[in-house]
Amino acid sequence: MQNKQTLPDSIGKTALDLGFAPQFIIIDEYSSLLASLGSDKDDKTIKSRIESCLTQLTQKARQASILVIISLQRASVDSGLTSNIRANCDLKILLGSSDSTTISMLFGSQAGTNLPQVNQVGGAIICAATCRCLSNFLCLILT
């Protein structure tokens, strides 16, 4: 008699499907974190390791129901947020209006022509990877 091997029921499911609560990792002021490192060899090694780990984390987080939140005052080339990390972020939110450099960093170089205008306090733009569209929304500001 031959033993049939069956695949576990958990294959193809997310952590939420299996009953695990979602986890959040928040990195506030990512560019300040990198800027706090010096320019000597050891600090450059640490910076490279941080970028490598964050890239791996953003790639694998969705399967484990981990939401990675990276905040920046201003997205720019020198902010340290590599294209690999940005590409793996499913949801991008821009609070308030911004310059073309920041818009290009977050939403891609073609976004500037299709970007809705933010012209009110609390206005923001959101882009989800699943919808490939930019939409305007109003966020609540608590003071």
Image (cartoon, grey):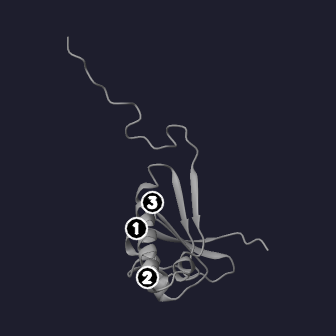
Res. 130 in view: no
**Is 125 in front, or is 77?**
77
Give the residue pinned by disc 2.
104
- Which quarter of the rendered picture does the C terminus lie within? bottom right
Q: CA distance from mark 3 to mark 2?
A: 23 Å
Q: Is residue 124 above or below residue 59?
A: below
Q: Amino acid at mark 1?
A: Ser
Viewer-nearest of labels 1 and 2?
A: 1
78 left or right of 143?
A: left
User: Looking at the picture, how far across and down is residue 36, in whole percent?
Assistant: 56, 81
Give the residue pinned by disc 1.
52
Q: CA distance from mark 1 to mark 2?
A: 23 Å
User: Looking at the picture, how far across and down is residue 10, in whole percent?
Assistant: 41, 35
Q: Which residue is at a point 44% across and 78% down the rendered structure image?
A: 42
User: Which labelled disc corresponds to residue 57?
Assistant: 3
Q: What is the secondary structure assignment of the residue under circle 2?
A: helix
User: Which labelled disc corresponds to residue 97?
Assistant: none
Q: Amino acid at mark 3?
A: Leu
